[in-house]
C-alpha cells in the first residue's frame, strides 16, 4: 500500500472532512489578495512597454533631424539621442 492509501484507510472520515472544509472555504467567498497586485503589475508593465517604445521613437527622430550632414548637430547631441534610445529600449524590456 502507498502512503496516501494508508492515510485514507487509517482515517475513515478524511474525505468527508476534506469535502466539508472545501465547502466551508467556498462559502466564505474570500478574495485572492494577490489578484489586485497582479493586475497593477500587469498594467504597469504595459505602460512601461508603451513608454519605452515612445522613448525609442522620440530618440530616433531627435537623432535624425535634417539640420546637419549626419542628421545631428554634433557628437554631443548624437550621444544624447543614443542615451535616450537606450533608455527607451531598457524601459520597454523591463515592462
Image (cartoon, rainbow, N blue to C red):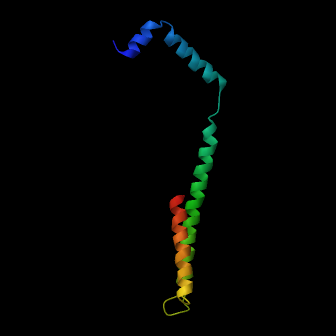
Measured from the top left, where is residue 77 in percent x and y? 57, 85
* Quadrant of the image containing the N terminus: top left
Quarter residue 81 falls in: bottom right
Report the residue at 59% width, 19% height from top: 23
Report the residue at 42% width, 7% height from top: 9
* Quadrant of the image containing the C terminus: bottom right
Decide: is 62 above or below 25: below
Decide: is 92 above or below 31: below
Q: With 32 as the anchor, is 75 left or right in this view?
A: left
Judge by depth and name the residue closer to the eye, 85 or 29.
Answer: 85
Report the residue at 62% width, 44% height from top: 37
Measured from the top left, where is residue 44 in percent x and y? 61, 55
Which residue is most to the bottom? 69
Quarter residue 24 falls in: top right
Report the residue at 61% width, 40% height from top: 35
Q: How many labels sit on residues?
A: 0
Decide: is 83 above or below 38: below
Measured from the top left, where is residue 84 in percent x and y? 56, 74
Judge by depth and name the residue closer to the eye, 79 or 33.
Answer: 79
Quarter residue 65 falls in: bottom right
Measured from the top left, where is residue 51 in percent x and y? 59, 65
Amino acid at each position: 500500500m502507498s502512503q496516501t492509501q494508508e492515510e485514507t484507510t487509517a482515517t475513515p472520515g478524511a474525505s468527508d472532512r476534506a469535502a466539508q472544509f472545501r465547502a466551508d472555504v467556498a462559502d466564505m467567498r474570500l478574495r485572492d489578495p494577490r489578484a489586485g497586485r497582479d493586475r497593477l503589475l500587469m498594467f504597469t508593465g504595459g505602460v512601461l512597454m508603451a513608454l519605452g517604445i515612445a522613448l525609442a521613437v522620440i530618440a530616433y527622430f531627435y537623432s535624425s533631424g535634417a539640420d546637419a550632414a549626419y542628421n545631428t548637430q554634433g557628437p554631443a547631441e548624437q550621444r544624447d539621442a543614443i542615451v535616450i534610445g537606450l533608455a527607451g529600449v531598457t524601459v520597454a524590456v523591463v515592462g
